[in-house]
Image (tube, helix red, strand yellow):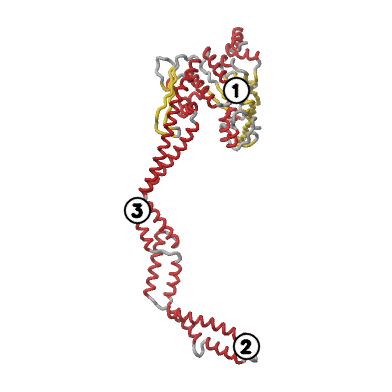
Amino acid sequence: MLRRLVVENYALIEHLEIEFDSSLNIITGETGAGKSILMGALALLLGAKNDSAAIKDNSRACVVEGEFDIARLGLEEAFKELDIDYDNETIIRRTISPSGKSRAFVNDQPVQLSDLKQLGAYLIDIHSQHQNLILSSPQFRIHAIDTIAGNGALLAEYREAFMVLQEARKALEELKSAAKRNADEEDWLRHQVEELRGANLREGEIEVLEAELRTLENADSISEALQRVTQSLDEEVTGVLTTLREAENSLRRISENYSAAGELMERIHSAAVELKDISATTSYDLERIEANPERLDAVNLRLDLIYTLQRKHRCEGIAELIALRDKYTEQLSAIEHSDELIREAEQRVAEAEAKSTALAIKLHDARLKASPALSSTVEEILHTVGMADAEFKIAVIPCTPTTSGADTVDFLFSANKSVEARPIEKIASGGELSRVMLALKTTLARHLALPTIIFDEIDTGISGRTANDVGDIIARLAQSMQVIDITHSPQVASKGSRHFLVYKEQSRSNIRPLSNEERVEEIAKMLSGDTITEAALAQAKHLLLL
């Protein structure tokens, strides 16, 4: 529950601090005194969008702080999921700097606004008068019936299945679209694959072919040079190898008398072996290399084919052409097997549809089962608050599946027995909407187990005995949870366990708790206006059971 609220520098509020009771807290005050400002500050605390224009004094920050007792709410896991430190006495603080920068803290730990909103949903439910309009919201109506039915886990399972179905349908459509596109390109793809396969491409081939082309184009000059090398090495009289053999023999003759001759012979012999190998290589190449116009044409044709393919497909080399060939081959294979892939995707869609439909049926059945109980409870409360002939029915109507299931929910209402129940947003008056919303909120609050619910002038449009009955309902609700009720009704105000007065002083909004005597005067003023009569005082005491 909300133990304490502190507001500083927000709109007309300079500074106020309120300590709330654990049951029914009543807030009253004249129109314009600042009750709506107080609600704005609370909304800010729970993650609402900040408005820097609400800062009255631009020289300092706006601060809203709330202290909550959450010991019995079982929120440890929720705090863990949000990665926030848990404490039974949790303090939430929101600050807005004069520049409009907003910061939020939970137990002095900085948090994102999205986390603050999620946490706030566990702590407080604020119902203001304009929220009566959400009775026309399909999402609210489904949420209401699912809350009563306890469909939380089932709805989550359905939504997961529905998401899987949507993804399966999307994948199927993409396969069909791709198959259609590919089918239109099948002949072109087949031609490209056949052309690239027929080229029999091999990585590194261009380098080999270009080297061979240079050799073939210069065969005569290469042969001439090789012949000169061979002759210079092997010439019988003047060749290098002959000269080296003679040098080796000369050293051999003096080896007995010249100790260095042996080493020199070995060195000359090694040089001779290397030169002999060179001679053999040049002789072999000389026999192999010759002008070969046919081979030259073949190499040129091969290179022209590869270069043409590179230009056609805008590839830098054979590796890219091979990768493109493999890509086109895969696309062609996908076309040839598209029917099989589509059948598999259709099977996945069918399985997902079956699961989603089965869960939607469970949701539908659960909603149908819960509808009479919710209708009966709401009708019972409506009868209590002066609508003896009111009829409230819930219609669960099958529809095209959405993330909420395969149902729409209508709230059907009639204030008189002679009038057929119709959709509530089309037939109910403002006062009737307020009472229906009170009945729904009262019922839902019990099932949601919220620690605090705030009613902001939910009793608008009612008075007299009906207002007293509304007050009784709110008081009974406050026996099991904390209720903060902003009201203009003296009958409702008299039910509170603690009564606060919002008032304006020197253009500033303030709030203070009222003593028993002050409560009598405040309620008497609510009954008779600024001039408090003895009759009003007596009536106020009667309402307060004094």
User: For mark 1, does the 10 Å Cα neighbourhood hold few (<14), some (14 to 19), or many (20 or more) residues?
Assistant: many
User: In the image, residue 365 lies at what x, y percent?
Assistant: 43, 28
Q: Quadrant of residue 190?
A: bottom left
Q: Label 1 to label 2, Cα distance in Å?
A: 121 Å
Residue identified by numbered label 2 = 261
User: In the image, residue 290 lies at what x, y percent?
Assistant: 41, 78
- SS assignment at label 3: helix
- SS assignment at label 2: helix
Q: Is residue 416 above or below residue 274?
A: above
Residue at left offset 34%, top offset 53%: 186
Q: Nearer the viewer, residue 485 or 123?
A: 123
Of callouts 1 and 3, the N-terminal one:
1
User: Label 2 sits on what residue type?
Assistant: Ala
Q: Label 1 to label 3, Cα distance in Å?
A: 74 Å
- SS assignment at label 1: loop
Residue identified by numbered label 3 = 186
